[in-house]
Image: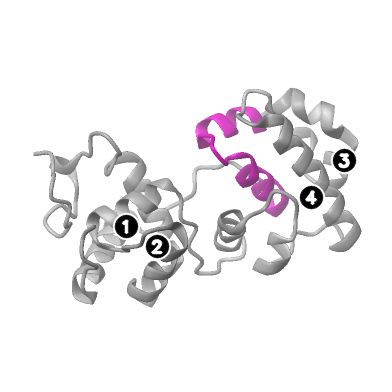
Amino acid sequence: MPKQLDYTTINEIFRRFQENEPEPKGELEHTNAFTLLVAVALSAQATDKGVNKATRALFKIADTPEKMLALGEDGLIEHIKTIGLYRNKAKNVIALSQRLVDEYGSQVPSSRAALQSLPGVGRKTANVVLNMWFHQPTQAVDTHIFRFGNRSGVAVGKNVDAVEAAIEDNVPAEYQQHAHHWMILHGRYICQARKPKCAVCIIADLCQYEDKIP
C-alpha cells in the first residue's frame, strides 16, 4: 500500500483537478432531491449510464414520493428491470417513499442519520445526496475513489470508511466540496482498474503508483 502523500502534494493534485474541471458534476440524472435519492439508491452495483437509461422514463411519471407510491412496486419494476438487483431495489424505493410521506412531509431530509434511516440508503448514498443536493462537503467513497485514493496516495485506507476519513483529514478544505467528484471521474476515465491511462494523467508526476503505464 502506498504511503499517504503530504499536504503540499495533495494540494497540488487538487489544484490541477480544479484547473482542469472547475465544477465537476455527478453523472446520475435527476430533477429534484427525491429523484437524486432514488437514482443513487438504484446505482449500487450498477453503472450510472444504465441507471440513467432506466430512470429517464420513470422520473417523468414518478418524481415525488406520492407518485412513486401510486406507481407501486410492480410498476416500478417494469421501469428498472434492466438494473441489477432490481426486485430488492424496487422494494426499498417504495418503502423509502412511504417513509418520506409518513415521517418527513414528503421531503428528503438533509441529515445523514435521517437519510440512513431510510430503507436501502447507506452511508455512501447519504453522502452523495448531502453533497450533490445539499452542498455539504461529504465524501462518498465508491470503487473508483477507493482505487485512486490508495494507488495515488491521496487517501490511503484499508476500507471505504478509512479512505473517507483520509480524504476528510488530508484534502485541503477549499477542495472538499468537489473532492469526491474529481476523484470518481478521474478513477472512472483515467485511473482505470486494468489499464490506467497514465500517459495522459495530469497528476502522473505526483502519483505514487509504481506500475504506471507509459
Task: Tell whether label 1 touches label 4 (CB within 8 Å).
Answer: no
Disc on the earlier residue, 3 or 4: 3
Disc on the earlier residue, 1 or 2: 1
Figure colour scheme: one colour
Which is more toward the observer, 193 or 176? 193
Residue at 59 percent across and 59 percent down: it is 123
Q: Residues within 10 Å of mark 1 (few under 14, many from 20)?
A: many
Task: Tell whether label 2 touches label 1 (CB within 8 Å).
Answer: yes
- Disc 1: which residue: 149
Tell me the distance, in whole angstroms, between the alpha carbons under discs 3 and 2.
36 Å
Tell me the distance, in whole angstroms, between the alpha carbons under discs 3 and 4.
10 Å
Disc on the earlier residue, 4 or 2: 4
Disc on the earlier residue, 3 or 1: 3
- Disc 4: which residue: 96
- Disc 2: which residue: 163
Q: Residues within 10 Å of mark 2 (few under 14, many from 20)?
A: many
Tell me the distance, in whole angstroms, between the alpha carbons under discs 4 and 1.
32 Å
- Disc 3: which residue: 69
- Residue 75 is situated, as x and y percent measured from the top left of the image, at 82, 27
Q: Which corner quadrant holds the C terminus?
A: top left
Q: Which circle marks residue 97 in the picture?
A: none
Label 2 element class: helix
Report the mark closest to the observer, 3 or 2: 2
Write the start and end of the magenta stretch as one range: 32-55
Q: Residues within 10 Å of mark 4 (few under 14, many from 20)?
A: many
